[in-house]
Image (cartoon, grey):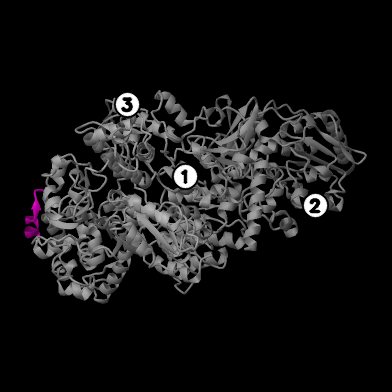
Amino acid sequence: MPTLTIDNKIVTVPSGATILDAAIAAGSRVPTLCHDDKLHPYGACRICMVEVMGTPRRMVASCTTPAANNMVIETMSPAVIEARKAVLEFLLINHPLDCPVCDKAGDCRLQDLVHEYGLGASKFDEEKRQLPPDLSSAVIERNANRCILCGKCVRICKEQNAVTALAFTRRGGKSRISTSCDRPLECEFCGECVEICPVGALSSKQFKHKARTWSLEETLSTCLYCGNGCPIKLLTRKGRVVRVSPARNNYLCARGRFGWDAVHHEERLLVPKMRKDGVLVDCTWGEALSHIAVELKKIKEKRGAAAIGGLGSIRTTNEDNYVFQKFMRSVIGTNNVDLLARLKMPRGLNTAIFSAELASLGESDVILVLDPDVAEINPLTGIEIARAINQKGRDLILLNSGPGKLNRIASVKLKAGSAEIALSELIAAIGGDARAKSEGIAEAVSLLMKARTISIVLPAELSPVVVDRAQYLARLLGQTTFIPLIRRGNLQGALDMGVLPNYYPGYREINPPETQGMNAVEMLRAAAAGTLGALYIMGDDPIGNSPEIFLMLKSLDLLVVQDIFLTATAKLADVVLPAASFVEKSGTVTNLERRLRSLAQAEEPLGESKPDWMILQNLARTMGVPMTYASAAEIMNEIRTVVPAYNTLTVGACWPRELSPALETGAGLSLSDDTFLKRELITADRLLFSSGSMISRSREIGTLSRMKTAERKASHRS
Amino acid sequence: MSIKPVAGENESMNQMLLKRISIPNSADIDVAMAHGAYASVEKAYATRPVDVIDEMKRSGLRGRGGAGFPTGTKWSFAAMDPKMPRYLICNADEGEPGTFKDRFILEQDPHLLIEGMIIAAYAIRAVRGYIYLRGEYPVAFGILNRAIAKAYEKGFLGSNIRGKGVAFDLSVHRGAGAYICGEETSLIESLEGKRGQPRVRPPFPANAGAWGMPTVVNNVETLANVPFVISLGSEAYAQIGSEGSTGTKIFSVSGAVMKPGGYELPMGTTLREIIYTHAGGIRGGRRLKAIIPGGVSTPMLTPDHLDVKMDFNSLLSAGSMLGSGAVIVMDDSTCMVKATAVIARFFEHESCGKCTSCREGTGWLSRIYQRLVAGKGRENDIDVLLDICKKMKGTCFCPLGEGALQPVLSSIRYFRADYERCIRKDGCDAKPCKG
Amino acid sequence: MLSPGVIARIREARRQYPDARAAVLPALHLVQEEAGHLSAEVMGPIAELLDVPESDVFGAATFYALFRWKPGGRHVISVCHNLPCSLLGAESIIEHLSRKLGVAEGQVTEDGRFSFQRIECIGRCDGAPAMLVDDEYHGELTPEKIDELLARYA
């Protein structure tokens, strides 16, 4: 614990701390360009130089020099200021002064520092370097002239994500950050390099010339593209989102960072539509809601409430789902309410039981990954694994991987026929069975036995056998957490809200069993058989996922679809109601870690669209049932009284897994036993840029998707 | 090969390192062994590793690569780190322009180097060694590979050296043209297959070098001294040389002298003796104008410094450095602007590009020099050059940037008139820039 | 893209190191020795063979001055232009070579026999001015000596 003097202040810092750490502790402001707490120390830019007093005095880079006992440091001595000015003058030798057309202006470290240190005219009077910009990469633009070679992009790409698409190339003054052979970028396009670039060398094409950074307003919200529910910043200009960034110290994948543009897609539903003479035509809210109210009443009177069903959504908020199930139960009077997403939940895998916090990967000594495509299926999980290995020195045991990013950082490369076989052999080996096995089993066992804490990343295609064996292995090893690869949006929240035929909100079981409703599969079957008269679908597109469902739904008397686009399912509907997108409403979602996240409204709802809960409330009112929520927050207040786990749950916190009733009852929440539709509904494409009604309308993701498809085709040919 | 294979004639009784190279086929293991090669291995093995390190400390041997760090101390740092395996790396990236001392050993007495490495490896308990050989030494590459194979055959390398239960494996790793790899952390990066850029220190190689393990990096000439420390004993060894600089030094003498070559002389020999007694004085009846005493990264000296002793301390006092002991001699026909321009171009080419000051500073310096020698000097060029040096001083990541300043600062200091003539374009008869 | 022979030799080189990445430089040398130069086409195969990110292979390959990215002549002449050689006439040697071969630096003669380039110090300062022809050193060069030497290379 060295004690040292910085700018006349005495500070004690932990051993291993750098002078920069100590300076921060002492309240001194030392500028940095190449340093980032997320990355290994690098020491290249030289802007953080400070002066170590003594004889002789010496200048050191504070970011890489350890703080030592009795050091006396000055961070703003005349020599320091001279050195910083020198570094800035050097950096401006080749940096173009094109700030007027640079999207980074206003948020640029170099610009700020040059301004702060009041650099006069440079003595540099030679030719500037001129390099061609890369305009051909998808999503990201690279301008090498603006690059100050701090290497943050190279390091974040390698250290945080293990992708290593970018590297330093060439040497000396010709150094350039580039890709292999200067080709366009081929990577996961997470955009972290753009985020971390201190200047305008890497920029988002999506944001190009959209706004000056100082005109942006910031709204903290949550990404809904997968169950990780990453905190995001919605950056708006004049009430319109122009950019999405990760909030705080988080990071994002391509979908989260670039995929939001779907909300501005020209196909957004702006007004309600209803079918007249067989054709969907625009109508007023009054016409649409009246029509639905009349039809629903008619069916209820004629065939009973059980002839009406509702499918909730994992793409909307907890509040939307809560109001949805409440509408079905108390306005319609049926428990026929469910989530199609349950079809994709493996049997026995209650996500609430299984999911550990993603961050626990970094706390585990050993990470056993049973799906080699983890990084493509769930990029965030891939990043978290890479961070655990590269930044925290954990060990990775990887099953059946070819050359690739995780293979390169794996301590043990297991080769076994399948996850089932690998698990069985691990269990046998731990039990002392030393017979010859698949490659890597012995090494894996020795790592696992030494580890104090272990994370197991389960394969995306989970069979009951895998779940059983993984649980058995966990019991043998102790201190094991599971990370599933399911990547659906607000699945956890929708389940918690009781969008289930057999549970009320908070997993209160509906008794007697005869009063439980039909599940999603039963509803679809009933629709096909003609026993279901009306189906109300909020924020889901079964036909889009599986065209065969068209035949099942076409004989319904009433199909209502509430969505942001005219999806394949909506095209069959009798009434289509325009919903507000996730940037246009407030509310909460619950991610796979059971963590409550909040959505905040950054834009006015487009056209006449409204938040889902408000549409349902208006419909209830049209049907003569009073519903008087003034805001999503008011709905949340009610949820807190109804769902015990949410009673005192604050945004950012996880509800304790012990509160999951399925732990006691062992009841699964999965519908995957029902093979009737499972095959159709699980999309064949498990990869990163796979379709979905929203993501498929992102221009940026569309570009990436086409590129990936072309790549895959090319690799099949070769 | 049309270059004479012998080092400069020097029959000093202090000659150790270059003693065998005048023998025909000295690179042949049988010839070398007949003349004493590998004799010190068993003597070293008869003592404990820690004794070898102590012996090295007592000998006063300092690194011959440029920095002059005490060799025994360096070894002890690695030996104290409990991590295993440890690595021994021979720095044969002799890249400092004007330096060719290691080449004699690499090409003509490789077994002396291997012998030194076997002892060093024993001292630090390294079981794996690499000779990092510069890519510009293709002939040495073949010779070293053959020598290593022969040493394996004779049982001096392998898993049980001479039946003593000591293991040491050795191979050659070829560089590919990067001066920066002479810096030990860059060399380690390059050995690991990366760009040769210097690492953040700490951790130091002694604790986390190659593949994160304790590593000693020693220059060829340093390792070649090791067998003599063992065979002579540290006390006798320390008798050679001068205060603070024990042993001999191979001086690479080049430029405007009658007899350029490698001269092994005791540390502390004067520049005058090296240039006039051994290298035969200045060519063509010209007058001496400037001397670079330790390779192009060391400050230039003038005829006034001829009586400076060539050792670590004396050269520091004279405002320069021993460096690699590469003495480059310039006569009065040399335009110092042009000579410095060549050096500036070299540093621009060799800057690794990692840190701002060196990357941009060396490029800026060189661009001014190239303009100067093209006859396009400007009135304020000297001021700008000095200003760039001031800005680079103390702000570079590694010693390369600091080295790049020395020729600029010293040539302006001693030969400002050349710069002024060059800028004014009067009276400069140097070719091709006839102002 | 890599010949079976080169692949085998890269694998052999790899065994000298505790980590595959260390074989990147040996691999680049081996490829250049066989093909005469490096190319974009070999970066991927080397990266895959050693399971190193391709951008890192390219980053390393472009760092080192001795790797060439375009075909040289059958014999590659590298003339040292550093200070000791320069003091003794390296520039006039380069001029002479250029005139004699009828090509500029970095270019290949029409008959494909030679290409020539500058190189930093090759450690033959005692024989300055000096050059390398392929893997052979020649020193104390004069225009006459160069004419004589060139005739010896087919």
Tell me which residue sits at (62%, 63%) in the image: A718
**Front in this rendered view, residue B53 or A498:** B53
Q: Residue A76 carries which label?
A: 3
Residue C100 is situated, as x and y percent measured from the top left of the image, at 41, 57
Q: Do the residues labelled 2 and 3 touch (CB within 8 Å)?
A: no
Q: What residue type is labelled 2?
A: Ile
Q: Which of disc 1 and disc 2 is earlier in sequence? A: 1
Q: Could you say where residue C153 lies in the image, as x and y percent from the top left?
A: 40, 67
Number of labelled discs?
3
Query: Label 1 is found on which chain of the structure?
Result: A
Query: Which residue is depicted at the point 60% across and 34% down?
Result: A208
Q: What residue type is labelled 3?
A: Met
Q: How crowded is mark 1: few (under 14 residues within 10 Å), some or many (20 or more)?
A: many
Quadrant position of the C terminus of chain B in the picture: top left
Marks 2 and 3 belong to one chain? yes
Which of the two discs, 2 and 1, sits closer to the camera? 1
Q: Whole-Å distance between the Cαs marked 2 and 1?
A: 53 Å
Q: In which quarter of the image is residue C125?
A: bottom left
Q: Which of marks 2 and 3 is nearer the N terminus?
A: 3
What element does badge 3 sit on? loop
In the picture, the quarter occupied by the N terminus of chain B is bottom left
Q: What stretch is highlighted in magenta?
A: B234-244
The amino acid pointed to by label 1 is Arg
Residue under pointer 2: A549
Q: Disc 3: which chain?
A: A
Q: In this view, does A74 lie above or below A595?
A: above
Which residue is found at the position 52% from the left and 35% from the top? A200
Whether residue A11 sits left or right of residue A467 in the image: it is left
Q: Rounded to the nearest whole Å, what is the CA distance between mark 2 and mark 3?
A: 70 Å
Answer whether residue A70 is visible to the viewer in this image.
no
Q: Tell me, yes or no, whether dots 2 and 1 are on the same chain.
A: yes
User: Label 1: which residue?
Assistant: A176
